[in-house]
């Protein structure tokens, strides 16, 4: 029988040492796993979090091996490059911070006094992804480590961190009659140690309702209940295969019915492995979007970064469960797990809750010619370790990989190799990629994956909201046979900032909500968009950022990084997506002090009608869908209540004479009215000229270039790296400089804008 022992405690952390010998002798600090050394400095801004090689050590008891048993160390995540020493001997080197790897330590174990030393390195290099991206690259042993002991005859431990068992269900749904669905389930096993056969079993969550027929070598073909469906599989060169037929298969049917089966394999010597799987069939249609089990199933969901405030990426199971509960509350049916392989525990939760997953590797932002082998190894680990998860629908090849450079032949070849590898390892799922918004739609890069998606931020970083609509319409018209998705979109919001007239660039909670209102309307009228993923469900650490009143965070989340506050936009999506929990949400609960005589009260609800009460008196009832707007006169302090059936919520608003400056980002009093019309002389340049016109003039272009360079520097290293992108420059060329400066937020002060405009007004056109 195999045994697993968590190596949670007893570790000594050494931040700096020149080698394993020095790390072994250093004093260090006691820590428990999971652990990251960047939980604080990776979230506080400045782009100065520690990136280097740190060390972990602990004693290791000899497990008392006998009869040919083998001992392995198993690491679920060591970011980013790890090396393992036992008793002074280097045993392993692993590059990739998000996947499981194992180390056979059998031959190096002593009877007593074993010392394990692990180095973990998250420093800058040119070969291990990620190296440039808008999130913190935490270092550490941030997932669990274990000691695993297996018998001499055991399921393979040495193939890219997988468990030696792979399940492939093939579902047939005749004439889209789901009640008549059946499945053929192939269970493959890989073993070491010389076993002659394996016993393979398939069972259901409720075994008495699933009939299974066993076919293949040594099978009698009789139909029996799933619980009794056992096949003895002969092994040749350590490999065996069993085939099961489920004539009345219980489908894994997304959030409606995420039914799971279990496949178990056992060797005569007692070693056993098991895995859960789901029987489902899906495809993408360029005109009608995503289909699950023969029915249209629009994928509407969010993206998830795994970190959180105060913990970094060192998450507990309770934290994973809390995240899933928030996913369920908002009503999403899909997750983009970005931008790397996430914890097995979270994939399990997606299986159990019917959440369809886009899984990807951290091949992101910057193509590194020396990183090809690393992309292939990370993809191989992602696919082999996660093949059996019912929730995973596709493999993501890369994200915004052209943001920091052009499309080269080396980049194209890297993607071809990744695409071919995915299809070789897993012919049952499709491939995709997330394209940066300035990538030309006729680029040969888009021809490589099976389907595509775009990350668009019109209405936030640049341009207007309506450009999102135009982009998708133009793409679909030009490429009607291509499947296109919406892989990222969002706007930053600091819940402290509030306004009666929110606008792009002000970081208010209100603008984020208005932004998402527009996007949801856009999506609803385009059913051919195969998937949509909000960027992001949670605020997350990006230590290079310094904007929106919070250093070190990307604030596009619908929920704050500590998971304690759900922004108004969260409830907008809940109104659209959550059909199970009747609710009303009053927006603007943090916008208490208001200067306007008549204020807008906005309500999000999944109910067909909402009634508003002011100071206990009914003001108005509205019928509608999702979004309800009431205009309410205010004169003092008022209690505002919204009701829909049994659901109710109450907020307080107060009429004040002067604007509460705590609500204003940068204390600037707004970003719209920097100038009066009289401040502009005809025939001379100004900030109201387009970026292209200004850049075409040597003197004006130099003035603008200096200010824009300073603004870019405040947005972190990713913003600096994309500033030279030619396609981005072409997009910006047609936009008024004034619009771009407003979107720069606190990176550009009003005084700087006035000085720039005054200087431009001295330059004759």
Image: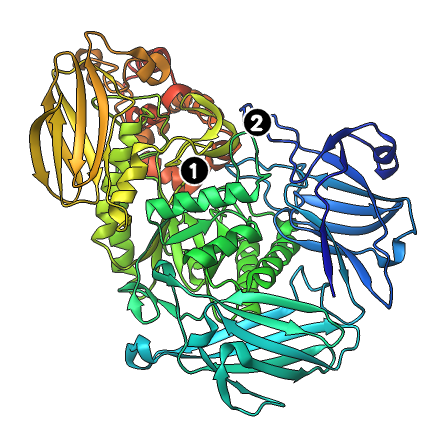
User: For numbered disc 1, what is the local secondary structure?
Assistant: loop
Residue 47: assigned label: 2
Q: Residue at x 88, y 32 (%)?
A: 25
Camera-side residue: 373 or 593? Answer: 593
| Residue designated by label 1 | 538
Name the residue at the front extreme. 208
User: For numbered disc 2, what is the local secondary structure?
Assistant: loop
x and y percentages locating residue 473 in the rendered image: 24, 53
Tell me which label, 2 or 1, sits earlier in the chain. Answer: 2
Residue 26: assigned label: none
Q: Residue at x 74, y 77 (%)?
A: 268
Looking at the picture, the colour scheme in use is: rainbow
Camera-side residue: 636 or 491? Answer: 636
Q: Which quarter of the rendering shows the C terminus?
A: top left
x and y percentages locating residue 380 in the rendered image: 61, 61
Q: Residue at x 62, y 28 (%)?
A: 49
In this rendering, which labeled residue sits more in front, label 2 or label 1?
1
Q: Residues within 10 Å of mark 1 (few under 14, many from 20)?
A: many
x and y percentages locating residue 554 in the rendered image: 45, 32
Quarter residue 241 falls in: bottom right
626 displayed left or right of 148: left
3 displayed left or right of 291: right
Residue 438 visible, this orientation: no
């Amino acid at each position: 029988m195999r045994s697993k022992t968590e190596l949670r405690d007893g570790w000594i952390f050494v931040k700096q040492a020149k080698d394993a010998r020095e790390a072994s002798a250093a004093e260090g600090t006691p820590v428990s796993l999971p652990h990251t050394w960047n939980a604080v400095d990776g979230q506080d801004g400045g782009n100065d979090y520690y990136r280097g090689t740190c060390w972990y050590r602990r004693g290791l008891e000899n497990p008392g091996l006998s009869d040919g048993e083998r001992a392995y160390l198993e690491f679920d995540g060591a970011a980013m490059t790890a090396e393992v020493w036992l008793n002074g001997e280097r045993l392993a080197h692993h590059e990739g911070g998000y996947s499981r790897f194992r180390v056979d330590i059998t031959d190096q174990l002593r009877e007593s006094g074993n010392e394990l030393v692990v180095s973990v390195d998250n420093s800058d290099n040119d070969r291990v992804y990620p190296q440039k991206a808008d999130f913190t690259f935490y270092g550490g042993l941030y997932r669990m480590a274990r000691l695993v002991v297996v018998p001499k005859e055991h399921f393979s431990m040495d193939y890219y961190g997988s468990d030696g068992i792979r399940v492939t269900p093939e579902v047939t749904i005749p004439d889209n009659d789901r009640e008549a669905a059946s499945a053929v389930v192939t269970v493959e096993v890989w073993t070491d140690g010389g076993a002659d056969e394996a016993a393979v079993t398939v069972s259901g969550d409720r075994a008495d309702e699933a009939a299974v027929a066993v076919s293949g070598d040594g099978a009698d073909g009789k139909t029996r209940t799933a619980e009794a469906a056992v096949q003895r599989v002969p092994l040749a060169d350590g490999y065996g295969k069993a085939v099961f037929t489920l004539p009345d298969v219980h489908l894994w049917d997304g959030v409606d019915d995420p039914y799971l089966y279990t496949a178990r394999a056992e060797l005569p010597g007692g070693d056993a492995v098991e895995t859960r799987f789901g029987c489902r069939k899906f495809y993408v249609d360029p005109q009608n979007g995503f289909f699950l089990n023969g029915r249209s199933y629009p994928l509407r969901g969010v993206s998830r970064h795994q970190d959180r405030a105060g913990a970094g990426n060192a998450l507990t199971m309770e934290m994973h469960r809390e995240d899933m509960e928030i996913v369920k509350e908002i009503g999403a049916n899909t997750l983009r797990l970005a931008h790397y392989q996430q914890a097995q525990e979270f994939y399990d939760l997606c299986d159990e809750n019917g959440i369809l997953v886009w899984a990807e590797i951290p091949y992101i932002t910057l193509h590194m010619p020396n990183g090809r082998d690393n992309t292939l190894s990370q993809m191989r680990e992602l696919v082999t370790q996660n093949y059996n998860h019912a929730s995973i629908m596709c493999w993501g090849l890369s994200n915004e990989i052209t943001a920091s450079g052009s499309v080269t032949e080396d980049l194209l070849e890297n993607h071809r190799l990744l695409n071919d590898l995915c299809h070789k390892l897993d012919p049952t799922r499709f491939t995709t990629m997330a394209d940066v918004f300035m990538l030309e739609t006729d680029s040969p890069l888009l021809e490589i994956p099976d389907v595509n998606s775009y990350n668009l931020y019109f209405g936030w970083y640049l341009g207007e909201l309506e450009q999102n609509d135009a982009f998708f319409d133009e793409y679909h018209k030009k490429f009607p046979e291509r499947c296109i998705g919406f892989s990222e979109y969002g706007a930053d919001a600091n819940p402290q900032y509030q306004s009666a007239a929110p606008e792009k660039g002000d970081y208010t909670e209100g603008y984020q909500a208005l932004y998402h209102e527009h996007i949801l309307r856009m999506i609803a009228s385009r059913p051919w968009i195969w998937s949509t993923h909000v960027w992001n469900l949670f605020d997350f650490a990006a230590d290079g950022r310094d904007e929106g009143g919070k250093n070190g965070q990307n604030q596009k989340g619908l929920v704050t990084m500590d998971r304690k506050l759900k922004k108004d936009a969260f409830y907008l999506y809940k109104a659209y997506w959550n059909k199970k929990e009747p609710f009303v949400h009053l927006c603007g609960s943090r916008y208490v002090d208001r200067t306007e005589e008549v204020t807008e009260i906005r309500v999000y609800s999944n109910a067909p009608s909402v009634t508003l009460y002011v100071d206990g008196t009914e003001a108005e009832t509205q019928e509608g869908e999702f979004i309800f707007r009431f205009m309410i006169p205010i004169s003092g302090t008022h209690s505002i209540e919204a009701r829909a059936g049994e659901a109710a919520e109450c907020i307080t608003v107060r009429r004040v004479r002067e604007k509460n400056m705590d609500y204003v980002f940068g204390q600037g009093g707004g970003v719209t009215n920097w100038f009066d019309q009289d401040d502009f002389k005809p025939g001379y340049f100004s900030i109201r000229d387009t970026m292209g016109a200004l850049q075409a003039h040597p003197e004006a272009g130099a003035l603008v270039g200096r200010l824009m360079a300073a603004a870019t520097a405040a947005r972190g290293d990713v913003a600096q790296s994309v500033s030279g992108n030619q396609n981005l420059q072409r997009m910006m060329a047609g936009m008024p400089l004034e619009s771009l400066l407003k979107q720069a937020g606190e990176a550009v002060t009003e005084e700087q804008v006035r000085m720039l405009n005054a200087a431009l007004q001295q330059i004759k056109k």
